[in-house]
Amino acid sequence: MCGIVGYVGYRPVAELLLEGLHRLEYRGYDSAGIAVQYGNTIEVRKKAGRVSELAGLLKAQPLVGKIGIGHTRWATHGATTDQNSHPHVGGNGEVVIVHNGVIENYDILRRQLQTLGYVFRSQTDTEVVAHLLAHNLEEQTRLHGSPEDLDVCLKAVEVTLNLLKGTYGLGILFRDLPDTVIAARCGSPLVIGVGKDEYFLASDASPLVGYTKEVVYLSDNEVAVLRADALRIDHRSNGSVNVSVKTLEQVASDTDLGQYEHYMLKEIYEQPTTIENALRGRLDNEEATAVIGGLNLSAKDLRRIDRIVLTACGTSWHSGLVGEYVLEEFARMPTEVEYASELRYRNPPMSDRTLVFAITQSGETADTLAAMRECKRKGHPTLAICNVVGSTIAREADGGIYLHAGPEIGVASTKAFTSQVTVLTLLALYLGRMRHMSYPAGKRIIRQLRDMPEKISKALECHDKVREVADKYHHFNNFLYLGRLYNFPVALEGALKLKEISYIHAEGYPAAEMKHGPIALVDQQTPSVFVIPRGGIYPKVVSNMEEIRARRGPVIAIACEGDTDIARIADDVIYVPDVEEYLQPLVCAIPLQLLAYHVALLRGCNVDRPRNLAKSVTVE
Ligand code: G6P
């Protein structure tokens, strides 16, 4: 949700920032812009639209310099216009900033600044920060010296930050302080790349890949000063911070498209490997259990736990729902799944025996982070199931489990979902074996999990059939997605995928529940996608399917290979490999991801950059 880049060093900065913005574009693509400093001059180029639009502008009006900041925007305040694009200029050009986050008290600050004579050129909350910085710089200069003095500039930053309510990751250039980029963080992620005679700033590590492996994660309430030859970080209350440099594991090819046309397709096809990575080293055949190293809780602590709360947003919330089923079934552990945006403000009774897991691909989702912090505040052990190493949630959690799925760039989450489900299943096995589960049962689950990468490869063989189905149905404007038990969350996820990238209205429902409302939508123009692999209540779901057929609704079935009966009821059948019920979400997710992908392509939608969405939602 908005991407920030910054650089100070010896390289031509405009090209570097542009490349960084391309890599961060998944965080927002309403507009893009950069500011480059050369001596005491800062020049800005910005444009509504994708980063490629900005690249065009820079070709026509190049910028030269070795220090700069850039931004790719996901609009919160103000329409997607050139004026509302970042960077924003404060005062008469003394300060230029980029911002990720939301300034909640921007309205009152804006009115105060207008009274002081500041003229606003945009409708954004960010411009308030730019003018405030300019104003405070003037004040501090009057009190303490010159705008060329770093301490004066830092004081202006400090006074400004004290006035802000809300969240921010900021990149700041002061016109009279050449060779310096200042960064500040409160609630929105920032990482600093450490090079030789150069420093990088970014919202996440992707722009640094290929340039440096040494990174420093900025924490909330820290302010960093980046100069080609030095990095200084201060905590706003505690003073100077000992800089702790971490090593990045990501390699450049992780973010390459390779042979694929879109990241989403690439990531769908990575799933045999990403599931294998989630399982690697975590299956203990001897003990018939899972090996989960990072929980930082002893077996004794874990046996004390009598309830689990899983909290997440979006697709991660759907994987949590699968987690609820499997944790209750394998570990007999009462489990609840909470929308993080609700949990953060609710006050559900939770005892000190409640274990909380935040599930998040990015590790930066604002609501998930806030819910996790709220649970921590109340003393619950709070763990993360997370993909991005070093992300805020991964760092703040008491422990957790990484997905090891590699960077997920496509805005519609695919491989993260199946990796989360895999990890939650491992967790259920682990807790189950600590409690009720027998040795043979543990052995059986391990065997079944081991087979999953191969089963997912087989599931991908449905691709041609899915293409055909997409071709037949892509012009419909309403869809129902129906499934029961483990496949109810899969139905929700399938509907979400279609909505997200093809802008078709789709509702996911427990198949039997559709009689209580959604069935009123059914007609020849409303196809239903049934997730109906074999299982204990298969005949019941068949009855639900018949109910739709009786109302002349077209039916697409996701069924187990060999299930020829279903072809007599459904209009179209997409087959997936036969697996145990608790593993069906993994195989059944594949055709639904591919279906959304192909329908979106056929409707001319931008699969990797769907409108209005962002990969990482760092605002409330
Ligand atoms: C955004 C993304 C979704 C994702 C959700 C939660 O809405 O577009 O794909 O599921 O955030 O993100 P997280 O990184 O916390 O899993």
Image (cartoon, rainbow, N blue to C red):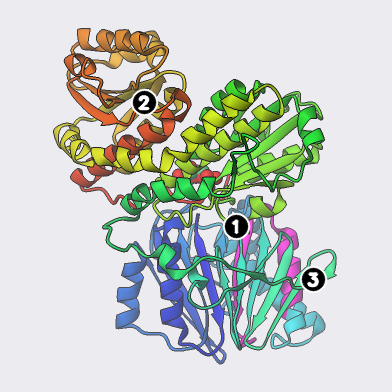
**Three-letter code for the amino acid on which mark 2 is drawn:** Glu
In the image, is the residue at mark 3 within 8 Å of ligand 1 by its beta carbon? no
Name which quarter of the figure residue 39 lies in: bottom right
* Number of the label disc, if any, that sits on residue 507: 2
Do tag 1 and tag 2 residues touch (Cβ < 8 Å)?
no
Distance between the alpha carbons at the discs numbered 1 and 2: 33 Å
Q: Report, in whole angstroms, how far the alpha carbon at label 2 lies from the one at label 3.
A: 49 Å
- In this view, which residue lies farthest toward the front? 286
Mark closer to the chain start, 1 or 3: 3
Label 1 element class = loop
Please name whichever residue, 453 or 367, is drawn nearer the observer in this view of the structure: 453
Label 1, on which residue? 389
Mark 3, residue position: 241
Q: Is residue 547 rendered to the left or right of residue 268?
A: left
Secondary structure of residue under mark 3: loop
Magenta run includes residue 169: yes
Q: Residues within 10 Å of mark 2 (few under 14, many from 20)?
A: many
Q: Point out the stretch of residues depicted in magenta.
A: 153-179
The image position of residue 26, as x and y in percent, is 42, 57
Of label 1 and label 2, which has the lower sequence position? 1
Please tell me whether residue 211 is drawn above or below residue 531 in the rendered image.
below
- Residue type, numbered disc 1: Val
Residue 378 lies, in percent from the top left, at 80, 36
Q: Is residue 381 above or below residue 166?
A: above
The answer to whether residue 96 of the structure is visible from this angle is no
* Residue at point 40%, 62% (across, down): 31
